Amino acid sequence: MMNLSNHEYFNVNDGRQISVSTFYCIGRNYSAHAREMGASVPDKPLVFLKPRTAYIPFENASLTCPSFSKEMHHEVEIAIVIGDDIPLGVQNGFEKYIAGYGIALDLTLRDIQSIAKQKGEPWAISKGFAGSAPVSTIFPMESYPHCTFSLNINGELRQKGDTTMMERSFEELIAYCHSIFHLKAGDCILTGTPEGVGPLYSGDVITAEIQDVLTTQCTIA
């Protein structure tokens, strides 16, 4: 199993550490990924949660598929970390409350998720298991950035995304989540994955990149 001790803080590249809270994950925010999953883009953002124990620092992590699953998939996403509690009633101008952004994996136990979908059950186990949200170092942002990002496995490109392809923007996602959940410092929004998701195997080397910002790597044990 992954060593999750002391993995309680997001690391910001300016030296700050932010205590990890709740993950708000956005499904089907890239239409091509929705199609590859046999689904459509929802009328409102599709939100599911991961607990704080889902977090693990991305850099040089050794990830393990839980013993109760046989099929762990990669989903690469841009993560937005909230740096300060957002006051109730705020509807725009969220930039000043954001600590920054980075790259993350929404690791998914696809076999467990498929069974849950068939039975109409929640996705909590398939999406929220311990260590299911590796997140990179966080880089401060002064405005909502345009990001081109990618994921390679063993040197082969598997996913490539561009935030201009999102169905809903960073600001729209933050506003929606805040209107329902009241976002606090340490909350993290995973903003959706582009097409190309697929299985991970023991020995895989995963390299994730935000173009001109950061590159990070982890492995599958």
Image (spheres, grey):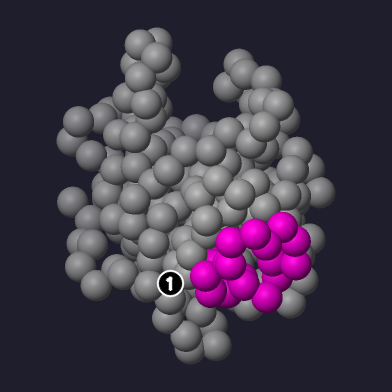
| x 59%, y 61%: residue | 88
Residue 97 visible in the picture:
yes
Q: Quadrant of residue 95?
A: bottom right
Q: Which residue is mark 1?
A: 10
- Please tell me how crowded label 1 is: few (under 14), some (14-19), or many (20+) other residues with Cα within 10 Å: many
Residue at x 18% of width, y 35% of height:
67
Q: Is residue 125 above or below residue 191?
A: above
Q: Residue 3: x, y in percent?
A: 20, 62
Q: Tell me, yes or no, if residue 200 can be seen here.
A: no
Q: Nearer the viewer, residue 29 or 68?
A: 29
> Residue 147 placed where, x, y %?
74, 59
Image coordinates for residue 194, horizontal then vertical, percent: 65, 39
Q: Quadrant of residue 96?
A: bottom right
Is residue 95 one of those drawn in magenta?
A: yes
Q: Is residue 18 above or below residue 120?
A: below
Q: Is 172 positioned to the left or the right of 86 in the image?
A: right
Q: Secondary structure at mark 1?
A: strand
Q: Which residue is at 26% across, 30% downward?
A: 69
Which kind of residue does numbered mark 1 sit on?
A: Phe
User: Magenta part of the protein: which range?
Assistant: 80-99
